[in-house]
Image (spheres, rainbow, N blue to C red):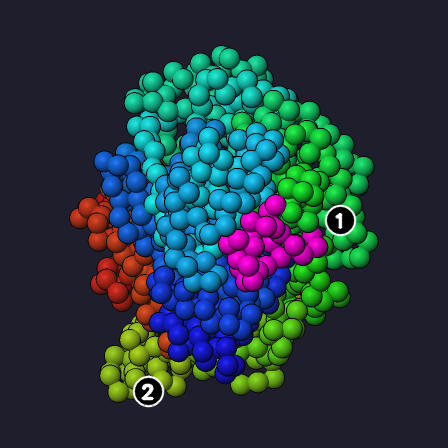
Amino acid sequence: MTDLEAELRRAVRGEVGFDVTSRALVTMDASNYRRVPLGVVAPRDADDVAAVLEVCRERGVPVVPRGGGTSIAGQATGTGVVLDFTRHMNRLLSLDPEAGTAVVQPGLVLDRLQRAAAPHGLRFGPDPSTHSRCTLGGMIGNNSCGSHSVAWGTTADSVRELSVVTAHGARLRLGQGWQGAPEGLRALVESELTRLRTGFPELPRRISGYALDALLPEKGADVARAFCGSEGTLGVLTEAVVRLVRAPRARALAVLAYPDESAAAEAAAGLLPHDPLTVEGMAADLVPSTADLPRGGAWLFVETGGDTEAEAHARADTIVRAADVLDALVVTDPAGQRALWRIREDASGTATRMPDGSEAWPGWEDCAVPPARLGAYLRDFRDLMTAHGLRGTPYGHFGDGCIHVRIDFDLLSEPGVARFRRFSEDLADLVVAHGGSLSGEHGDGQARAELLPRMYGAETVALFERAKAVWDPDDLLNPGMLVRPAPLDANLRFSVLPREPVDVAFGYPTDGGDFSAAVRRCVGVAKCRTTSVSGSSVMCPSFRATGEEQHSTRGRARLLHEMLAGELVTDGWRSEEVRDALDLCLSCKGCRSDCPVEVDMATYKAEFLHHHYKGRRRPAAHYSMGWLPVWLRWVSRMRAGAVVNALAAVGPSAAVAKRLGGIAGERRIPRVARETFSRWWRRRAPAGASRNSGALVVLWPDTFTEHLSPSVGRAAVRVLEAAGLRVALPPTLRLRGRRKVGDGRSALLNPFAPVRGRVCCGLTYVSTGQLDRARAVLRRTLDLMAPVLETDAPVVVLEPSCAAALRTDLPELLHDDPRAARLAARVLTFAETLERHAPDWSPPRVDRPVTGQTHCHQHAVLGDAPDRRLRAAAGLTGELSGGCCGLAGNFGFEKGHFEVSSTCAEDQLLPAVRHAPETAVVLADGFSCRTQLEQLAGVSGRHLAEVLAEAVEGERT
């Protein structure tokens, strides 16, 4: 333990972390920059903050305040001690509806304040796209804005008073009329009144530099306002009194379509006299092809408010009539509005990938110009990118003249970094020529501070330095930001990554086969750190359960980044820090769909475990549950199901089995079916053929359906046949010559077939990182499926996790075998099969409400739109919840995971079931989901096939 660490531990009540993991998690924010700190402190209160500052001042160690870590200019990273306010100083201290104010701590997430204010008809005005994870302290430090700034301004407009601790330990209460000003600040300002009155451009989004003009007497000498946007360089915020605004009772969203972004930009300023709440712009490059938007090449999202829906709609109609548009759409349905806003909010992540899949980066992503000049600026900006051979797609706050853009800089090579610098200098000159600000929302940080003299001139920047010296004479707080900045091309986070591709097992097709590129996908926008599920989203259940950064998708990606860098995490694939962070990853695949840049931590975890345990003994659970298909086939072969169930029901023998198998003691071992699905199939149809003569479908006998819940398979056969389809099972022998699938002969067994001839998706091997074994199993599966691939028959997979494995893991693991992609393309869910291959069939009416949860793999990989339509056709009403059940295959059964598994279930699934009507059908298509429901709530969940099969039988009787 270092002397600094020991002294900090003695001085503060909060946590002190100088270990590798604590430091690795905060080496980066959402910018291009990386700094390795000495340690991290999570203070419990202002006394802890003061104590940290005293210890660090005596030792000359820099201090960096940090909130959600979503800053895009590098200001939330540092080489000294990082203060993490999200762990303890994260409370809403009070809310006064009459005064319209709230008292908050710096680590409070914005959405928590919004939820508390909403019942009173109030809200905090600024709302960055990261509202679900950014903190009030970070917003004050950056003077954040968001989409509603045309109506409610910046964070500085919403601040009343701020409590701060200076580097020298002074505790100040900042406000108007010089309240709380440190000694010497007033004298400095009064000596420079002329410069302060003439040297600052008048812009709605001027965020760059220090807001010293807020200290002018005609502006109320507002010290709190001047502190906003100082990026942690003047003092450390410990508490804030913020102003709330009255939220409109109803809203309408007008989506205005234009030929291109320049036309949209030209139109934006003309809409401001109509008092909109937002004027947001984005081009088609950032919009998913499935987005339901009016025809055009670019759009303005213009929100209006009113006391009633009709009033809000009327204001939106007025704006549509006033706008010269190609087409327009007005949406008043809150769910429809949320879906549209999600497109805009995800742009900060989706913009990191160009249409061709190449990478794009921040750095010059929020310059602002006068709104009336935005169209001209955008044209010049496009020309400048073309001149430098760069590409990017602008979007952002068109009504405020603020543009966001990610640009395809090459930040990996020396020539690319040199071009990054040249472009940055030229763009700074262009912004200034249009009367703009280098930063219009995200602050200067390291990305732009070096170029502030081009905007303000050398003398004003020198004034900034003098102001910094008044507040922080020892340059202790966040040095290298705003004044005396580090070069904009230093400390780039990519410089430490390996230049040659890492040898890996998966193909990473969307990253050119490069694992480093896959890890680079995480740009730090931290959507995985949201504390509540929105709609059907899943990511990230382990973070919501623990609240710890290392158990978020971003935290794990940061540790993998440091593993590849080899500077902080030095033992590569053998790293225990990375292993421990990945241990609570449920492999739910939620990040694959919910992360704006589609980070796939489940795949990264499997990759890591493959290398980490290569040539070494694995945890017992990898053998007991990773090899589950083998053990269950042996039980079936020996007809030992009854014996296994009996032993599992006896306490002592079950305890021994669980201890030997690395299974959590709190879990019950699931019962093995008395008759496997395949045995029932042969008994029902001795020749192995379906009773129908319609279109052929091949029903996949996954391990769970085969051995643990064959009732699902039996139900699926009944429904598929009722729909007129001819059902066959995959071959169990590698067939010689041309043999017809589904004729009865292709499913014949010999005594050795149960061992040698079963198709398997390899899921249990993949999830435990046994990728060599998974490859072998999948190659055998492809051999067995060869006759099926010669037909056009779909492969119906009932277990969502197995379907997802065949759709994604199979082609990515066997990327060198063309058969893998062919089989993946054949895989359909139960609902997809009925919709595509029995389109004229109408399901029987069930006419009951449903509850339960969409399987996380279905949400992330397969999609559930066909399931929704099938449920609606059967009269199954209501929505399934999002999130993850928490069992997640082997995860919830592993020793040490029970608490997190249960907490995940309590996040969405169990409350949804408890609060459902008594008549509700509990739907759970995944075996894990059904097991979790049964073991934690005593509830029997059912596969959709079982519900429909029961109704089919009811029709027949």
Residue 99 vs 323, above or below: the answer is below
Residue at the outermost left position: 918
Residue 450 vs 816, above or below: the answer is above
Identity of the residue drawn at 33% across and 37% down: 244
Identity of the residue drawn at 26% across and 59% down: 940
Residue 607: image x %, image y %?
A: 59, 69
Q: Amino acid at mark 2?
A: Val
Identity of the residue drawn at 39% across and 53% down: 172
Q: Which numbered disc, 2 or 1, marks the residue closer to the eye?
A: 1
Q: Nearer the viewer, residue 285 or 407?
A: 407
Whether residue 887 is visible here, answered yes or no, is no
Image side of residue 719 versus residue 393, left or right: left
Which secondary structure type mostly characterizes the magenta part of the structure? Answer: loop
Residue 259: image x %, image y %?
A: 64, 22
Whether residue 849 is visible here, answered yes or no, is yes
Residue 253: image x %, image y %?
A: 43, 26
Look at mark 1 in the image and give the residue it sits on: 421
Q: Which residues are magenta?
A: 463-488
Residue 147 vs 266, above or below: the answer is below
Look at mark 2 in the image and give the residue it sits on: 656
Q: Earlier in the sequence, mark 2 or mark 1?
A: 1
The reply to whether the C-beta atoms of the residues labelled 2 and 1 are less than 8 Å apart is no
Q: Is 464 part of what is drawn in magenta?
A: yes
Residue 138: image x %, image y %?
A: 47, 50
Q: Secondary structure at mark 2?
A: helix
Q: Secondary structure at mark 1?
A: helix
Within-10-Å neighbours for mark 2: few <14, some 14–19, many 20+: some
Within-10-Å neighbours for mark 1: few <14, some 14–19, many 20+: some
Identity of the residue drawn at 56% across and 35% down: 193
Q: Is 246 part of what is drawn in magenta?
A: no
Q: CA distance from mark 2 to mark 1?
A: 64 Å
Q: Amino acid at mark 1?
A: Arg
